[in-house]
Amino acid sequence: MQTIFGPVSSRRFGTSLGVDLSPALKQCNFDCLYCELAPAQPVTKQKEVVAVKTVVDELKKHLNDEIDVITLTANGEPTLYPHLRELIKEIDKIKKNTKTLILTNSSTLTDSRVFETLKLLDQVKLSLDAVSANVFKKIDRPAKDVNIDEIIKALQRFSEEYTKELFIEILFVKGLNDTKEEITKLNETLLRLHNVKRIDIGTIDRPPAYPVEALEFNQLHAIAELFDASLPIHIASRKSTKPTQRSYTQEEILNTLDKRPLTKEDIELLFDVSSQEIFQKLLQNGQITTKKVDKIEFFLPSKNFLRKRAKNS
């Protein structure tokens, strides 16, 4: 039974070696509308459990110095894995300078054992698709006793206590969690979090389990601008995202980048050819500069960068 996959190149986390903690079947306490896995009844415990030794032995065969991060994931929710704490400690013995990362739907943070276990990891990425109970239930289709209000309380507390690299991910689905009302509530919740390194917002980019639709890039960009400017929002777009290019003047380009810095990929999806030529001239004459966050390079107006640097000095 193969528990290791990759390595894959992640623009956000570098070269990632995946660890599937539910290789045999989907075992998750959510049945998300957008999930690429087939629909399945939510469960709160794993029935088929892979041994820690199996995972570690396979990991040893694939781990090398070129791997930036060991990513704990699953065909489902990885924190349902009952030996997670033991596994992380065993991985720590062999990982050297490689970081450990988990991709979790945040639901089990309400369990004190999971809460404390996640503190052992170098990086934690928590999903938060909605904060309204009705929207949360529609989009994430959780197990019966999963309560979004309790999850948010635990998430806030975790953000205060976790001292390493914390990431938040929000996946938007057309007509469900993309309303101004829900985005306002998400914004209010995110502003109460501490020590968040990056907030990734994205949409469906793989065939979903249910008939739901992705947002176009310009819609994601408009949503990004609705969040408070102090939040480290990053549009987690992919080349498969449908381009929504349009014409921008020099002033509009600078204003757009001032509100929300963009990556090269974002610019290719958002600006038409003539606008990209204007962007290049602004970059060449020094009106636009770059700022690297983790492994991602963002473009922003030079005046914006100098102003922010002055505030921090």
Image (cartoon, helix red, strand yellow):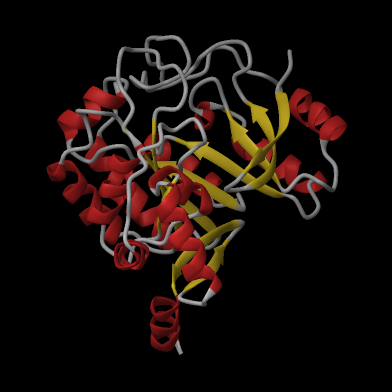
Please, is residue 118 above or below residue 294 in the view?
A: above
Residue occupying the point 87% across, 30% down: 61
Instruction: Give the side of residue 112 with respect to residue 211, left or right.
Output: right
Q: Is residue 151 visible?
A: no
Place of residue 205 in the rendered image (x, y in percent of width and height, measured from the top left): 45, 27
Residue occupying the point 72% across, 29% down: 6
Q: Is residue 95 visible?
A: yes
Place of residue 7 in the rendered image (x, y in percent of width and height, measured from the top left): 73, 34
Q: Quadrant of the N terminus?
A: top right
Place of residue 119 in the rendered image (x, y in percent of width and height, measured from the top left): 54, 52
Instruction: Give the side of residue 48 with respect to residue 65, left or right.
Output: left
Residue occupying the point 78% across, 55% down: 97
Please, is residue 135 above or below residue 217 in the view?
A: above
- Quick one: which residue is furthest to the left in this view? 181
Q: Quadrant of residue 40?
A: top left
Instruction: Give the side of residue 298 with respect to residue 191, left or right.
Output: right
Place of residue 47 in the rendered image (x, y in percent of width and height, measured from the top left): 53, 12
Residue occupying the point 52% across, 48% down: 124
Q: How many marks?
A: 0
